Amino acid sequence: MSADSQNLQTKYQKLAAEFAKQRAQVTVLKKAVIEEQGKTKTLQENVRQKDQSIRKFEQEIDSLQFRNDQLSKRVAILQEELDEYDGKNRRGKTRVDGVTRPDDNDVKDQELQIKIQENERLQREVNVNK
C-alpha cells in the first residue's frame, strides 16, 4: 500500500501544483479581459465620435453644395443679364457732362467676378471635405 499511497501522494502534489498554476493564470486572464474591455469601450467611443464627425461633415458638404448651386444659378442669371445688356448697349460707357464714366456694365462685371471667385472657393472647400 505504501506504493499506492506514494503514487497517490505524487498525483495529489501534481494536481495541487497544476491547480495553483491554473489559479495564477485565471488572475492574469481576468486582468487581461478587464484591460481588453477597457480598450473595447475606448474604441467604441472613438467610433461613435468619428461617426458623429462624419455626419457633421456630410451635412456641411450638403450645405456647401446647396450654396454652391445657388451661387452657380445666380452667376448664370447675372451672365444672362450681362449678355442682354451688352446686346442692347454695345458701347459700354456713357458720357455725362463731357466726362466718361463707367457704366453699370462695369459694376455688374465686378459683381460677377466676385460671385465667380466665391463659387470657386466654395467648390474647392467641397472638394477638400470629400
Image: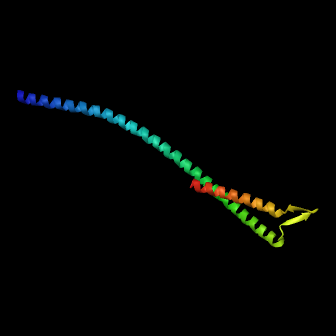
Q: Which residue is drawn at the image coordinates 78% and 67% (left, top)?
A: 82
Q: Residue furthest right?
A: 97
**Colour mapping used in the image:** rainbow
Q: Which residue is drawn at the image coordinates 27% and 32% (left, top)?
A: 23
User: Vertical placement of 29 versus 5: above or below?
Assistant: below
Given residues 52 and 64, the one toward you in this image is 64
Left or right of 80? Residue 100 is right
Residue 59 point in image, percent of width and height: 61, 53
User: Vertical placement of 127 versus 83: above or below?
Assistant: above
In this rendering, the count of numbered labels is 0
Is any part of residue 17 visible from this angle? yes
User: Vertical placement of 105 versus 44: above or below?
Assistant: below
Left or right of 118? Residue 10 is left
Residue 97, quarter of the rendered image: bottom right
- Quadrant in the picture for the N terminus: top left
Residue 123 point in image, percent of width and height: 63, 58
Given residues 101 and 107, the one toward you in this image is 101
- Quadrant in the picture for the C terminus: bottom right
Q: Which residue is drawn at the image coordinates 23% and 32% (left, top)?
A: 19
Q: Which residue is drawn at the image coordinates 39% and 36% (left, top)?
A: 35
Residue 114, quarter of the rendered image: bottom right
Q: Residue furthest bottom?
A: 87
Left or right of 121? Residue 22 is left
Residue 103 point in image, percent of width and height: 84, 63
Given residues 38 and 115, the one toward you in this image is 115
Is any part of residue 1 visible from this angle? no
Residue 61 point in image, percent of width and height: 61, 55
